Amino acid sequence: MAPTNSVPFAVKDCALIAIATGREARTLRELQHQLEEVDVSSIYYHFWGGLLRPGFEERQYHNDFAEWVRHQLNDNVLAERLAVIDPSDFAELEGLRAELVEVIGERLDESEMPAWSRSDRQLQLIRSQIVVFDTHVTLDQPRELAETVSRLSTSSIFYHFIDARRRLPEKVDDFRSWLAGLPGYEALIVQLAEIDPYFVTLAELKNHLATVFAAYFEEESDERTA
C-alpha cells in the first residue's frame, strides 16, 4: 500500500459569481472586437459558467458564444465551429481567446454582411469571480476518494476538477495534484488525465470520477488480498 500523503486533501465547494462588464455585442464583428479586449475571466465564464447555472432545459451547445450565434444570428455554420472548441485543450485562457477571435475572423471573411441580432437580444458579456467555501472535510488517504467523491456537490467537483486547471501552476486538477505527491498512483493519474470535463454535465462528470476511483481502489484491494 502506498504511504499516505503528509498533507491531507481539503475538500472545498464553490460558487461562480457573475459580474456585468458593461460590454455587449449585436453583430459578429462586435463580438470579435469585444473578445479581443474583454477580461479573460469573461471568456472563462461563458465557456464554463453554464455548468453551474441552473437551467430547466438542456442547451444545444456547450458555450454561450455558440448558443448566441446560433439562436440570435442564425449562423449554424459558425455555431458548430464554436461549439466544438474545447477549453480543456488550452493551458491558458489567452490561447482560448485567440482561438475564438480566429474562428470568428475566418467566418467574417466568408460573409460580406455579418448578421444582426434583434436589438433586445444582444450578447451581454459577463465576467466571473469564484467564491470558495470550506466544507470541513479532509481526506487522509487516497482510497477515501472512492467513498467521498460520489457524495460531493457538483460545484465541489467543478472546483476540484475544472477550476483547479486554471488555479494550479501545473494546470491539472486537484486530485492529480494531490496524488502526484505520492508514489504508486501513476496509473490512476493517467486515468484522470484522460477524462475531458467539458462535453458532459457536472453530474455525469461526478459519476465518471466516482466510477474511476471505485474501480481503481477495488482492484488495488483485490491485489493486496490475493
Image (tube, helix red, strand yellow):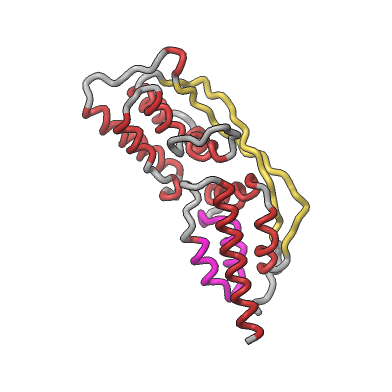
Q: What residue is rendered at 57% in x and 34% in y?
A: 128
Above or below, 112 relative to 177: above
Which image quarter holds the N terminus?
A: bottom right
Q: Is residue 127 visible?
A: yes
Residue drawn where x is 52% and y is 20% of the image? 22
User: Is residue 213 magenta-colored?
Assistant: no
Disc tally is 0
| Residue farthest to the top, as pictured | 119
In the picture, the quarter occupied by the C terminus is: bottom right
For this orientation, the residue located farthest to the bottom is 226
In this picture, residue 182 sits left or right of residue 83: right
In the image, residue 190 lies at what x, y percent?
49, 66
User: In the figure, 184 relative to 96: above or below?
Assistant: below
Q: Residue at x 61, y 50 (%)?
A: 157
Quarter residue 221 falls in: bottom right
Where residue 62 sits: x, y (%)? 46, 39
Identity of the residue furthest to the right in this view: 136
- How far across and down, in percent of the image, does residue 31 sit? 38, 25
The magenta stretch is 170-192
In the image, residue 143 sits, relative to residue 196, either above or below, namely below
Q: What is the x, y in percent for residue 116?
A: 34, 17
Give 69 or 30, whichever is nearer the viewer: 69
- Left or right: residue 14 compared with residue 200: right
172 left or right of 83?
right
Q: Is residue 188 magenta?
A: yes
Foreground of the two, 86 or 207: 207
The answer to which quarter of the image holds residue 184 is: bottom right
Decide which of 47, 178 is in the foreground and name it.
Answer: 47
Considering every residue shown, the one lying at the far front of the view is 57
Res. 40 visible in picture: no
